[in-house]
Structures are given as C-alpha cells and as structure tokens.
Amino acid sequence: MSKWITGIVVLLACVGLGVAVYGKVGERLDKKAQLDAEASTRKSDQDKPPPLTLARPVAGPVVETLLLTGSLKPAAEVALGFKLPGRVVEVAVKRGDVVTKGQLLARIDTRDLDAQMQQADAGRRAVQAQRAIAEDALRRARALAEAGAASEQQVVAAAGQTSALAAGVDQVSAQRRYLELVQAEATLHSPIDGVVVQAPSAPGFVVQMMSPPSFQIQRLSRLEFQGHLDDADAARLRPGGVLRLVSAAGVRATGTLSAVIPSVDAMTRRVPVYAEVDNADGRLFAGSMVSASVEVQAAPTLAIPLDCLLTGETAAVLVVADGRKLLRRELMVARVDGPRLLIRGGLSVDDLVVVSPGVTFREGDTAPTAEQIVEARHGAAGHLEPPVPPSAAKATAEGAAAAPAPAEVTPPGAATVVAP
C-alpha cells in the first residue's frame, strides 16, 4: 500500500514540474513573438519612403536693414590751456560742471603784467610830453626862419625831432595794446556750451609755454555717431536717412545720417559713415560703442527656406522639373535673412524646391504626383500649421464631423508645400 502512495506522489510531482516548465516556455515564446512583431513594424516603417516637403519661392523683403557698429563722439569738443606762463591763482569750475559760452574757467597771476602796463603808460606820457615840446620848437623855428633869424637847416632838424617823437608815441601805444592782449590771455573762458570733463582740482600750479591743456569741454547734448560700412552698402546710403542705434546699456535712440565720406578709410578699408544723434536727456555716453541699423531699399529677391540648400561648395537646390524629376539648380545668393535664404537668380515663383533634401533625395529621383501634393495653411501669427491631407480638408469643407476628428498623417512619399 505504501508503494502505491509513493508512486502517486511522485507522479503528481512530475505533473506539476511539467506544468511549470510549460508555462515558462510559453511566456518566452510570447515575448519572442512580440519582439519579432515590433522588429517587423520598425523595418516596415524604415522601408517606407520619407515624405517629400516642397517650398515655393516668394518675393523677398522690399526693405533691407544694414547693420553696423560704431562709437559716439561729442558734437563739439575743445581742449583749453593758457598761452602764457604763470601761476594759476583761480580755478572757477570742476569736472562735471555745465558751462556756457564765455564763462570763466581759470586765471593766472597778472601782477607782472599790471606792472608792465603801468610802465608802458608812464613811457607813453613821457614821449607825448617830449613830442609836445618838439612841436612847439618846430613852430618857433619856422617863425624865426620866416623872419630871417633861423636857417632852413634848423627848421628841418626841429621837424625831424618832432616826427621821431611822434613815432615813439605810436611805438609805446602799440606796446600798450600788446600788453592788453597778453593780459586777456591771463583768463581762460569756455568757447562753447558744454560739460567740463577735465579740469585741475585746485589752483596754485604753474603753467609753462608748452604745458598740456588744463581743461576739456564737451558738448554732449548732441552726439555724433561714427561707423564704417563696406563700399557696396555705403553706396546705398544717403544723408538725411534715419539711423537707429542701441547702446550696451540697452538705450535706444535715433539719429540722422549727416555724411557718407566718399573715400575708403586707410586703416579699416571701409567707408566712414556719420550721423547726428540727439542726447538732450543725457542717456547716451560719449565714447561708448553702439550697434546701429539703417533701412534701405532692397534689391528684388526671392526667398526660400535656408534648409533647402544642398551640401557642397556651390549654393544649389533640388527642384521638381518636367516629368516630376528632381533636378539640381544653382543659385545666385543675395544674403541670409534669418531662417530664409534670399536669392537674386536661379529660381522663379513657379518652381517647387525640395526642403531638407539631406541624403534621401538626389538629382534624378521622381517626385510625387500632383495629386499627392498637400498645401500648407498659414495659422495664427504667420506660423505654418501641419499639412491637412485632402480627405481631412474635404471633410472639414463639408462640415461632416461635428467633433474634432483624429489627425490624419501625410501618406508615405507625399509632398508638402510650405511657404518660406
């Protein structure tokens, strides 16, 4: 009896083990089948031809913005110093002061000049007195000569003495006027309205004939922009145009083009450009670097997405030609405008250009048929919305769907037309 019980137990154990093994094998087989299905799906997706996106060239901008950098200079600037040697006894302004034309800045000690002027005055009075005596002697000599009591030689001598003393009076008077001019140089006045940007901190120092300027005055209510452009862009500017600038601090201002110098700078090999900028509020700083822009009439161009370009040294794209063949077309590039490429030649507005050709599409490939081309619609703010397949567009037009229908995807190999 015990042998029968033992056999039954062994049999049940074997059956349980077989069931467990079968379950494990089944799970692995299911997992393998799932992986095989996913791999098959991926391979199927990879074998599908990628969608072809096409772009139609559109007219480029009618206005072009030229960018340049430059610096701001004071509209007027003077450096002042004394022409005379001497000790400065008064400094009437300090750095940062606003001054007006003719305002006193400083003066030097004039006691030596005052003494020389007094000496010149005394000398002039002495010579004038001597001339008066000589003139009286000349009148007496002429009277005596008429009476026969004096010779002609005596008259001539008296006349010569009178003339010499008259010249002496003129000489002393000229010396006096010269001293007046020199004394005027002993005071320094501002020749312009402006701001003091350099000045001595205190009087008492001595200036020499060749001393550097002691004061610097700048007119900062108006500034002058100084920049450079290449000759091709500078030829498109005209005085009177509007220049917009932005400082490093973010201050924005406008100015008026005042001059485009018709000569290339020897250092930069570019054309100097000048503009007048109002700075009545004082928010711009003289000497600072700024970024500027000027709008000019743009040459006629066409615009395409920048990623239409093929890789290579020459600018070229793929276009859909007759027979739906993709052909390579070389371009005459004007410039890059953000995400767009502006061209002067090589395409027309009727061409269809391949977007992002990469290595998938090559010259000679066949493009989709016209029925497969789906037009892109412009959404809010000019952004392109996803292409709508013909079936979805038709359903929308008929108003068949009361609720939003699931989005349809572009059929494999279809072409989407987008605007640059």
Image: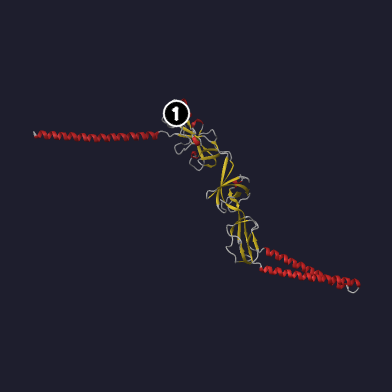
| Residue in front for this viewpoint, 254 or 199 | 199
In the figure, 221 relative to 372: above or below?
below
- Point 65% across, 63% down: residue: 187
- Point 64% across, 61% down: residue: 188
Query: Residue 46: x, y in percent?
Result: 39, 35
The answer to whether residue 29 of the structure is visible from this angle is: yes
Query: Residue 260: x, y in percent?
Result: 62, 48
Dot 1 alpha-carbon crowd within 10 angstroms: few under 14, some 14 to 19, many 20 or more: some
Query: Residue 344: x, y in percent?
Result: 56, 39
In the figure, 136 relative to 412: above or below?
below
- Point 34% across, 35% down: residue: 38
| Residue in front for this viewpoint, 242 or 389 | 242
Q: Residue 347 appears in which quarter of the rendering?
A: top right
Q: Secondary structure at mark 1?
A: helix
Q: Residue 235 appears in which quarter of the rendering?
A: top right
| Residue in front for this viewpoint, 235 or 133 | 133
Q: Quadrant of the N terminus?
A: top left
Total labels: the figure holds 1
Q: Amino acid at mark 1?
A: Ala
Query: Residue 181: x, y in percent?
Result: 70, 63
Name the residue carrying label 1: 392
Residue found at the very far bottom of the displayed protein: 149
Residue found at the very far left of the displayed protein: 1
Image coloring type: secondary structure
Query: Is 127 left, or right, of 63 in this rendering?
Result: right
In the figure, 99 relative to 319: above or below?
below
The answer to whether residue 270 of the structure is visible from this angle is: no
Query: Is 251 left, or right, of 43 in this rendering?
Result: right
